[in-house]
Amino acid sequence: MIKVGVLGARGRMGSEVGRALAAADDLELAAEVDDGDALEGLAGCAVVVDFTHPGVVLDNLRWCIGHGLDVVVGTSGFGEDRLAQVRSWLADAPGVRVLIASNFSVGAVLMMRFAAQAAPFFESAEIIELHHAGKMDAPSGTASRTASMIASARAAAGLGASPDATTTAAPALAASSATPRPTPRPAPVTTTTLPSKTPMMFLDRPCLNSSSEAPEPFRR
């Protein structure tokens, strides 16, 4: 039996992970840790699953890596700067492994893959994601990773940046809005009534969609 600890165990996703572990024959839910609990409760686990918050996930990772624990991360908020930080910690802990997944859904992963495959055949791409108002990060990890994969696919095909004629934008966006963009800029929309959706658009045509209301493979 593999002993697994869950960080964020009382949250929506952490609770789902706990139920899945309890139902597995070869895994043991060995520790459930949430806000206010001591991380020492994870001692003795072989693997830790983190579904917490972008504001605390790096501290959790640093602690786990320092204590020799492998980690699977479902928490969002990882740009290249954060990934570089995690790699630097791992360089000092060669026996520790960390998997940072932008989405655990089979359908969403396929959507990202298909978006990258389609990107070289279109002049531009847009990512418009819809989320409930309780979503902690915007854009989401799924949207950010999709944008990165589209940009890499376009670069590998020898294509230039997607056209963007925007000349006026909010201060936070102005620096990147007035010139062609090598990476699509996700547009997040949140309201209290929306399920999670990440539709992909190439030119003016919706082509791919990952939704929490979609068939089971997109939610799993």
Image (spheres, rainbow, N blue to C red):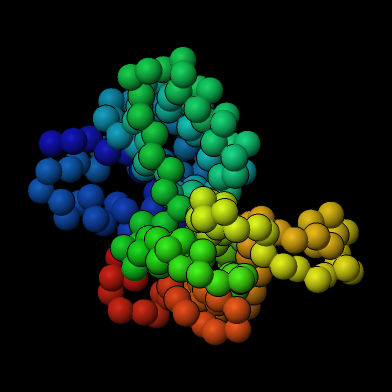
Q: Nearer the viewer, residue 20 or 201?
A: 201
- Pick the quarter of the image with the N terminus: top left
Residue 136 quadrant: bottom right
Residue 186 rendering spot, x and y as whole percentages = 63, 65
- Residue 99 vs 22, above or below: the answer is above
Residue name at image x 36 percent, y 57 percent: 104
As drawn, is 118 to the left or to the right of 219? right
Task: From this view, report whether residue 127 is shown above or below residue 44.
Answer: below
Q: Position of residue 112 (x, y in %)?
A: 43, 62
Q: Quadrant of residue 178?
A: bottom right
Instruction: Identify which residue is drawn at 51% across, 51% down.
Output: 156
Furthest residue to the front?
158
**Residue found at x 37% / y 18%:** 94
Viewer can see residue 46 = yes
Q: Residue furthest top?
A: 92
Of residues 74 and 17, the one nearer the viewer is 74
From the top left corner, tell me how far across and down residue 200 is, in percent.
52, 74
Which residue corresponds to the image point at 47% horizontal and 37% vertical from the top-left?
37
Residue 75 or residue 144, whichever sits in front? 144
- Toward the left, the furthest residue is 25
Q: Is residue 133 visible?
A: no
Residue 26 pos. (x, y %): 12, 43
Q: Is residue 80 above or below residue 174?
A: above
Quarter of the image with the C terminus is: bottom left
Is residue 217 found left or right of 100 in the rendered image? left
Which of the 4 image quarters holds residue 132?
bottom right
Q: Is residue 178 above or below residue 26?
A: below
